[in-house]
Image (cartoon, grey):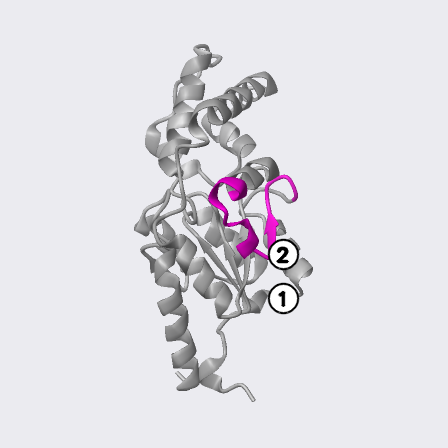
Amino acid sequence: MTSRASRRPFELLVFDWDGTVMDSIGAIVDCTFAALESLGDLAGHELPPRDKVRHAIGMGLLETMHEFFPGAGPELHSRVLEAYREQWVTIYKDRFHPFEGTRATLEALAAEGYLLGVATAKSRRGLVRDFERSGLGPLFQATRTVDEAPSKPHPGMLEGLFEELGVAPGAALMIGDTNWDLEMASNAGCAAVGVLSGAQSEERLAVCEPLALLPDVTALPPFLSGLRLRAAAGG
């Protein structure tokens, strides 16, 4: 019989990708500005501030365009999206890597028996490309991208993962670096942890009331061990 002290506090750990697993936020911001500047004419709109670009990461590209250029028509949105994709594929896609220690952390969590998943605003093609470059793909049992579900904070990505893996919302933990991740978890009925390695500040994430705010994903194993020990002690 499994002792209380050995029970995992969750069955499934779902990770956001950019800013959580991958050290890519700087590349995304730089790519966004390179794309906008390459267009020149933004139909009367000004370039958004860098902080606004950074805080919008995780929304999905189309939603971000609506945030940056309210009232603009689909032609501008289409031009910006195409320019972004061109800049990313030709220049920026190789300018980032997993955060230091992330691979070992994911391997340790998998060895403990956790199911691992990804929920990301990236496209499926982009995630597959990152998996190939990083070699992290085999560690994850299931993934959802913005191509298969509505953008965060809609709960669709998490709900799809729960259904595919047969895990109840209460047995899952979402790990992410933005309010969109934490709000998605709340909307899906699961717990969440914020990490401070990515796009948003501690203050912005704290508003979402996650279980904890950790410096990065390498702090996740001791956090989970602490939950397990407290549960075993009846705390």
- Identify which residue, 49 or 23, lies in the foreground: 23
Q: Position of residue 135 (x, y in %)?
A: 50, 47
Name the quadrant containing residue 225: bottom left
Q: Is residue 217 left or right of residue 67?
A: left
Instruction: Please name the residue that numbered disc 1 is placed on.
Output: 167
The structure residue drawn at horizontal position 60% and vertical position 20%, both measured from the top left corner, is 74
> Where's the N terminus, which quadrant?
bottom right
Q: Residues within 10 Å of mark 1 (few under 14, many from 20)?
A: some
Q: What stretch is highlighted in magenta?
A: 131-148
- Badge 2 vs badge 1, beta-carbon distance below 8 Å: yes
> Where's the C terminus, which quadrant?
bottom left
Q: Which amino acid, mark 1? A: Val
- Identify which residue, 206 or 16, lies in the foreground: 16
Q: Per the image, is 142 magenta? A: yes
Q: Looking at this view, name the residue that lies furthest to the bottom.
A: 1
Say if residue 163 shows up in the picture.
Answer: yes
Name the quadrant containing residue 212: bottom left
Instruction: Please name the residue that numbered disc 2 is placed on.
Output: 161
Q: Position of residue 158 (x, y in %)?
A: 59, 55
The structure residue drawn at horizontal position 45% and vertical position 20%, both measured from the top left corner, is 35
Between the C-alphas of marks 2 and 1, the distance is: 8 Å
The disc, 2 or 1, on the residue closer to the chain's N-terminal end is 2
Residue 27 vertical position relative to residue 202 in the rendered view, above or below: above
Q: Per the image, is 14 magenta? A: no
Q: Which amino acid, mark 2? A: Leu
